Image (tube, helix red, strand yellow):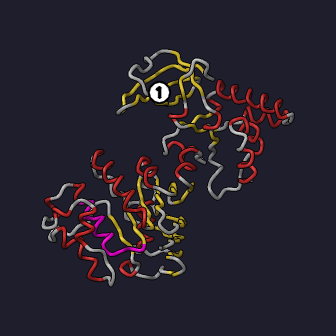
Amino acid sequence: MTRLTADIHATFTADGTEPFTVDAAIEVEPNETCVILGPSGSGKTLLLETIAGFHEHSGVVMTNQTDITNHPPEEREFGFVFQDYALFPHMTVRGNVEYGTRYRESSRDVDTLLTELGVNHLTERTPPTLSGGEKQRVALARALAIRPSVMLLDEPLAALDVPTQQTLRDDLADVLVDVTAVYVTHNRTTARAIADRIGVMQDGKIVQRGSPEDVFERPQSPMVARFTGANVIDLSAAPSLRRVLNSDIKSHTHSDGGTPSSSDHTEATDTAVHVAIRPEAITLSEEGDISATVERVVREDTTNRVTLAFDDVTVETFVNSSSPPVVGTEISLAFPRDRLHPCEDHTHLNGKWFNPSMIWLFASINPSMILDCVEYN
């Protein structure tokens, strides 16, 4: 079992482009899958390739307690699955999978591995004759055949059609159970399905990390919230919601017997604060918090994605009904307080800044946030 630690600092240059710096650290526990999630151009692949040893950097890469920073890629005992498969076109499937085993004292049985991945009937075929899904299974088998200490996967499902993605995603979840892995993707569905931990990457840095629930339910910035599919509401543009939350402050204060200072309360009300809430958490209710207008209804598989507007903001929710609301109608929305989460640009993973005047407003959203505010100060 291998524990991977990487602290990478590297600057990349190319003709016609500005220098790009990757400055990121990750720790992956034995048999854990760490997903690096982020938009295109955020540095995910560069981070993965640098960990693999393809690029020079200042920093350190360690497996367990062994420093392998200066080891060439072939001596790191890593398996790498490329987005474009990188199979040898002139070799058969068997030849591709066996290729790396000749350099390893211990390797897996190729026939058994191909059978497990459902491509044992393709052993004498060459890559140009395979479908995208078949190529990816062969690439995965090649990486696993050498019994890697760590698996590195660079968006291996990105080029596949949706049904094939879903099937391979399930297979990957099973395959990665017993191996330490770093998986790069921009697909939040894949990240949520296979990750034990997620690091969200932006502009070459890890801006948030945590369990899938932490990242998706409690984003620490508007960028993370939007990229993981949450609604981001600027309360300065949503006075209706702000009034509801401020009313909760008063109710919470009276029930607890405490009194926030009037200046804190006023500043909290007047300060622009972003809150995030997932679409599935917003519900249509006759006794909701806010009245909103239906702007758009889009059918998505077995559900309807409904866009609603109130004040100067829009939010999305899902309605699992054969009779979705009609565009233009007024509907009452309920915002569960335990699903609303403050997400300010100040609350970075390693940040120390947090506006104390917001504590009472955050407490109205979720009282446990008082502890979070104290932790970040």
Identify the image quadrant of residue 47.
bottom left
Outermost top residue: 329
> Which residue shows up at 24% across the image and 64% down it?
115
> Which residue shows up at 36% across the image and 58% down it?
172
Identify the image quadrant of residue 365.
top right
> Which residue shows up at 18% across the image and 67% down it?
93
Query: Mark 1 belongs to which amino acid?
Result: Thr
Identify the image quadrant of residue 147.
bottom left
Instruction: List x then y, in percent, for residue 268.
Output: 75, 36
Instruction: List x then y, in percent, for residue 372.
Output: 71, 49
Q: Decide which of 151, 173 is in the foreground and name it.
A: 173
What residue would you read off at disc 1? 307
Q: Decide which of 337, 244 is in the foreground and name it.
A: 337
The mark total stands at: 1
**SS of the residue under disc 1:** strand
Instruction: List x then y, in percent, for residue 59.
Output: 53, 75
Q: Is residue 28 above or below residue 248?
A: below
Q: Is residue 227 above or below residue 247?
A: below
105 sits left or right of 199 in the view: left
Q: Is residue 284 above or below residue 69?
A: above
Instruction: List x then y, in percent, for residue 53.
Output: 41, 75
Is-magenta flag for residue 300?
no
Q: Which residues are magenta?
A: 135-149
